Image (cartoon, grey):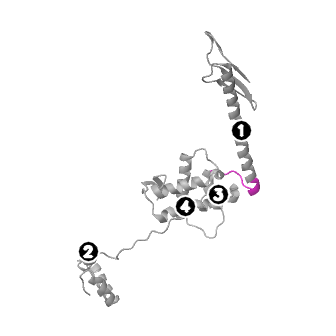
Amino acid sequence: MAVFQRATSKGHTQEYHFKFMFKRKTYYGVCEGCTTKVKAEAYEKLQIETLKRGSEQRTAKAYAENLRDLLTGGHEIKLSEVFQLAMSKPRKRAFSEKQGQRKQAIFDDFIAFMTEKYPDIVNVPQVQVAHAEEYIAFIREHGRFSKDVVYERAGKSLQWKTPEKLSNKTANDFLMICKEVFSLVMRDCGLLDNPFNFIPKLSREETCREAFSEEEIKAIRNSKNDFCRNLFNIGFVTYDKAVLSVILGKYGLTV
């Protein structure tokens, strides 16, 4: 370890510099704001302690990851490769090509989210519950992360923008497909738990409306379209007249 003032053509620099070795690597630089040797030595000591703490943290993390892999028999698998691995697993029921494409489109959206938000996370075991919760919360509020969807149909590449809001059912599909992918590769990746396991599904959306509005019923009965009018009359004949009387009475109509 050493602190010194660098020699220049005009004498020595006002600020001190440091130079030391740590784990066979040389570190050097300016002791910023340090114009005395005492301050410079304190600055250098702080740099060394910071490097030591970082090294200890990396060592502890590596130990935890190695222990996890040892206990589970897993190994590192990249997020970009995990979907294909999951789909290659044996399953009870085969799915169609179209279903497979939809599953991939949904999981690719999660990959796009992680790539942009957390570019340093590249392997499956690095994905935490917090990441899964953040992604599902995002799609429930804002829809798909990737708004532009490109797909192939009849040999042509088509592109369309997705809606800003997903239905509860579609949002649940995103959750279940991400959960499915992680569940299928848990042993391969050495996962102790599935990050999507603790996220609850949204409740089903329930809507209640009359089969036809007043205007729609009148329009059908008075329609000049023979097919619609005859179909409406068949309904009168085949449906319970007492029930029809009550329903139509609400709209000022009679059987």
Residue 138 at least partly seen: yes
Q: Earlier in the sequence, mark 2 or mark 1?
A: 1
Q: Position of residue 245 (x, y in %)?
A: 29, 87
Q: Viewed as shown, does residue 73 lie left or right of 103?
A: right
Residue tagged 3: 85
Which secondary structure type mostly characterizes the magenta part of the structure? loop
SS of the residue at dot 3? helix
Q: Quadrant of the C terminus?
A: bottom left
Q: Viewed as shown, does residue 9 lie left or right of 240?
A: right
Three-letter code for the amino acid on which mark 4 is drawn: Leu
Q: Quote the CA–CA distance across marks 4 and 2.
A: 40 Å
Q: Viewed as shown, does residue 201 lie left or right of 91?
A: left
Give the magenta part as a residue range: 69-78
Q: Earlier in the sequence, mark 2 or mark 3?
A: 3
CB-based contact (under 8 Å), mark 4 and mark 2: no
Three-letter code for the amino acid on which mark 1 is drawn: Ser
